[in-house]
Image (cartoon, grey):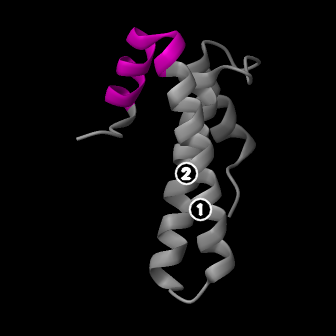
């Protein structure tokens, strides 16, 4: 189930500053986190869905690359984002 348009606007408004700022790294990471949670819930019910498993691995890799970029260029923003999203323990 894809993320609805209203949810996308809410994510980019909260993390990217405004709804039209869809290129912001923070907004993209938040959107990927939302999608990963959805696919993860799907995989809990459908354990043999290997194509979705491959898809979630790609999403996690993309989020990891975006977070590495953000950490390199804006350390304070990186720390605030992972705290807000609850990514690291």
Q: Distance between the residues labelled 2 and 1?
A: 6 Å
Task: Find residue 52 and report its image quarter.
Answer: bottom right
Closer-to-camera residue (15/72):
72
- Classify mark 2: helix, strand or loop: helix
| Residue 75 coordinates in the image, percent (x, y) | 41, 12
Residue at 32% over, 27% down = 83
Q: Mark 2 and 1 residues: CB-CB less than 8 Å, in contact?
A: yes
- Segment colored magenta: 71-84
Q: Main secondary structure of the magenta part?
A: helix
> How far across and how far down the image is residue 76, in percent?
38, 10
Give neighbour class at mark 1: few <14, some 14-19, many 20+ (Cα, 10 Å): many
Q: In this view, does 1 lie above or below 88?
A: below
Location of residue 28 in the rendering, given as x and y in whole percent from the top left corner? 63, 32
Q: Is residue 1 shown above or below 72? A: below
How packed is label 2: few (under 14 Cα within 10 Å), some, or many (20 or more)? some
Q: Can residue 37 be seen in this view?
A: yes
User: What residue is shown at x 53% (from left), y 20% (from top)?
Assistant: 70
9 lies left or right of 42: right
Residue 22 within the segment the image draws in magenta: no
Question: Which residue is situated farthest in the left direction here?
Answer: 89
| Residue drawn at the location 74% of the way across and 41% of the way down | 5
Tell me if 87 is positioned left or right of 37 in this view.
Answer: left
Residue 56 tag number:
1
Residue 22 lies, in percent from the top left, at: 74, 24
What residue is disc 2 on?
60
Residue 74 included in the magenta stretch of the image? yes
């Amino acid at each position: 189930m894809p993320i609805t348009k209203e949810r996308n606007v809410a994510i980019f408004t909260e993390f990217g500053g405004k709804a039209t700022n869809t290129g912001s790294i923070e907004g993209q990471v938040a959107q990927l986190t939302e999608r990963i949670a959805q696919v993860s819930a799907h995989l809990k019910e459908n354990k043999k869905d290997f194509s979705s498993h491959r898809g979630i691995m790609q999403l996690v890799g993309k989020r990891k690359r975006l977070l590495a970029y953000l950490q390199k260029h804006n350390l304070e923003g990186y720390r605030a984002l992972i705290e807000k999203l609850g990514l690291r323990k």
